[in-house]
Amino acid sequence: MNRGQSEVLGYVIVFSIIIGSVALVYATGYPSLESAREATATENVEKAFDVMDENIRDIQQRGAPSRATEIRIAGGTLELEDPATIRVYVENSTNSSDNATTSFNTVPVRYVDESGRVVSFESGGIIRGNGTDSAMIEGPDWTITEEASIFPVQTLIARGGTRSVGGETTVLVLTQLSSTSAPGSYQADSSSRSIVNITVYSDNTRAWQQYFEQMNGTVEDGVAVDGDIDDGNVYWKFRTDEAHVIRKGISVEFVR
């Protein structure tokens, strides 16, 4: 073999090694880069949900007429789900005629990335999941003590025709005050206590169960947390002297 042939053969071998190395790096590294990009996008949506929660509290507690939250979606889908239900049942320990039940439907806002990771905003709670399991990242703005418990319940109502947005885009989530209901209140007398039973009917029962278990351990008069979530709902019972439920209906709309 002459010298010219040797140089050509050497060039071909070196070039093949370079191409093979690039292909190997692309094959092994690109999925990791894509997964990291999706995870970052999902974390950004989670932070945006936290901002949206503060904006809704401005409407609910501080009298703001409306608020708008920008959410950047990167290849995933932002959607309004079918309503979840929150039921608050207050039972007088000595006089059943004072028992009271209040139920609310609320539309969860959910983001699903391309790998199936899920972040949901449900009645003030921010939930992260993977389609089969879920965990409460931030609980609702409820005040629960032995003396008095206050539940400012957020009920989101879908407005507009767009219930799902996907792709690479920025969505403006517009929230506005829709309605206010008179608070449902119960105050025990000196001879009785009230037992509050909060039941949540949701696709995220595991997250609510986790939240209720955590709260049950922080109050002196926690009674019980539902151990069976396979029936699509989960409850928590605890005792308190006073219970106050305040509801504000808030419309939610996607604007592109």
Image: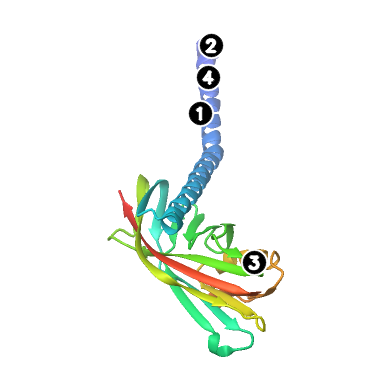
Mark number, residue 2: 2
Q: Which residue is mark 3?
A: 145
**Marks 2 and 1, how far apart in space?**
26 Å
Whole-number angstrom distance, CA of label 2 to CA of label 4: 11 Å
- Mark 3 → mark 2, Cα distance in angstroms: 91 Å
The crowding category of the residue bearing disc 1, from other C-alpha atoms within 10 Å (few below 14, some 14 to 19, many at least 20), is: few
User: Which comes before the other along the chain, label 2 or label 1?
Assistant: 2
Q: Residue at x 63, y 65 (%)?
A: 210
Q: To which residue does mark 4 refer? A: 9
Measure the C-alpha gap from mark 1 to mark 4. 15 Å
The quadrant of the rendering that contains the N terminus is top right
Query: SS for tag 3?
Result: loop
For this orientation, the residue located farthest to the left is 161
Closest to the observer, 28 or 193: 193
Q: Nearer the viewer, mark 2 or mark 1?
A: 1
Residue type, label 4: Leu
Q: Amino acid at mark 1?
A: Ile
Q: Where residue 155 sits: x, y (%)?
A: 42, 66
N-terminal-most mark, 2 or 4: 2
Q: Nearer the viewer, mark 1 or mark 4?
A: 1
Q: Nearer the viewer, mark 2 or mark 4?
A: 4
Q: Residues within 10 Å of mark 2 (few under 14, many from 20)?
A: few
Q: Can you identify the residue that label 1 sits on?
A: 19
Residue 146's image quarter?
bottom right
Query: Which comes sooner in the sequence, label 1 or label 3?
Result: 1
Q: Residue furthest front?
A: 190
